[in-house]
């Protein structure tokens, strides 16, 4: 399995859109889409928890080449808090209940669209890492907070750093 | 640095500021290509599928089974 690449990112974006899945990129993968320069291994999706949305997600993943058993489809439909998928063309973490974010709807209100990729707001990405408080989060938080401040500085000068290119 | 800088960003180390600005100039496809890497992570990468009913269950699993150097343990 190689690293997650841009073609796969657009594949998942397009497949999830076709199936009407309500989700956002979160974690460092979300921050990367917002422009954060760092490395990561995982693509993390924060998915709205409902049976219908879970079913749509399972259908989209199947279309992308993930080999889901019936039991695994049930997990996605039930909205288990964390589902780790390494049975497809790339690794994917599906998170229904990230630390530090109370409701999907609240985070969705302030999400950022980056060329069709729905991404959690940088404040939510940081809040989630602060609440998780893992060693790896502690290591990345100072730079993520600096990136948030830099983004705000750009926006206060009328520059949209997420502008499509 | 210019006098128009937002006060918030004044505390950002110069090298980070330059990296953020450079990243913003790159097309999204390039940013993604530079960002996503793949290295083998023991235990974590050894199963094709895992699901955890609760976040607490997931955190406990990480702390019990993953090598501490991977950084998944809570502080």
Image (cartoon, helix red, strand yellow):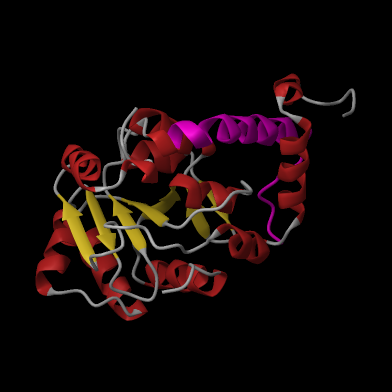
Looking at the image, residue B13 sits to the left or right of residue A122; the answer is: right
Q: Looking at the image, which is closer to me, A49 or A7?
A: A7
Horizontal and vertical percent position of residue A91 = 37, 65
Viewer can see residue A137: yes
Side (left or right) of A3 relative to B24 = left
Residue A21, quarter of the rendered image: bottom left
Q: Report which quarter residue B48 is drawn in.
A: bottom left
Q: Which residue is drawn at 54% across and 46% down?
A: A31
| Main SS of residues in magenta | helix
Q: Nearer the viewer, residue A95 or B69?
A: B69
Give the quarter of the image for residue B60.
top left
The number of callouts visible is 0
Image quadrant occupied by the N terminus of chain A: bottom left
Residue A27 higher or lower than A56, as above or below: above
Q: Give the residue at x 18% y 56%.
A: B51
**Spot occupied by residue A123 in the image (x, y as percentages of width and height):** 50, 33
Q: Where is residue B70 in the image (x, y as percent from the top left)?
A: 38, 46
Residue B12's place in the image compared with A161, above or below, is: above
As for residue A50 lying within the magenta part, the answer is: no
Q: Is residue A100 visible?
A: no
| Numbered range of the magenta stretch | A137-165
The C terminus of chain A appears in which quarter of the rendering?
bottom right
Instruction: Work out which residue is located at the far top of the displayed protein and give it.
Output: B7
Q: Position of residue A105 (x, y in %)?
A: 34, 41
- Residue at image location 27% in from the left, 48% down from the top: B66
Taking the spot 72% from the left edge, 26% from the top edge, the residue there is B9
- Which residue ends up furthest to the right in the rendered image? B2
């Amino acid at each position: 399995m190689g690293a997650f690449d841009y073609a796969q990112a657009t594949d998942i974006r397009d497949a999830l859109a076709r199936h009407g899945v309500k989700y956002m990129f979160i974690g460092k993968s979300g921050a990367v889409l917002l422009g954060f320069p760092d490395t990561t291994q995982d693509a993390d999706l924060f998915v709205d928890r409902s049976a219908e949305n879970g079913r749509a997600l399972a259908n989209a993943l199947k279309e992308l080449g993930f080999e889901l058993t019936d039991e695994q489809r049930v997990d996605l439909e039930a909205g288990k808090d964390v589902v780790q998928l390494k049975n497809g063309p790339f690794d994917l973490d599906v998170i229904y209940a990230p630390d530090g974010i109370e409701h999907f709807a609240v985070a969705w209100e302030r999400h950022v669209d980056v060329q069709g990729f729905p991404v959690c707001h940088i404040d939510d990405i940081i809040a989630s890492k602060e609440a998780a408080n893992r060693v790896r989060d502690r290591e990345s938080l100072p730079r993520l907070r600096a990136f948030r401040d830099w983004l705000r500085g750009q926006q206060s000068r009328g520059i949209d750093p997420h502008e499509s290119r | 640095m210019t006098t128009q800088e937002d006060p918030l960003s004044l505390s950002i180390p110069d090298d980070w500021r330059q990296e953020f600005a450079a990243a913003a100039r790159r097309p999204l496809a390039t940013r993604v290509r530079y960002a996503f890497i793949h290295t083998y992570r023991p235990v974590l990468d050894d199963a094709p599928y895992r699901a955890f009913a609760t976040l607490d269950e997931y955190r406990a699993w990480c702390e019990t089974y993953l090598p501490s150097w991977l950084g998944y343990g809570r502080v």
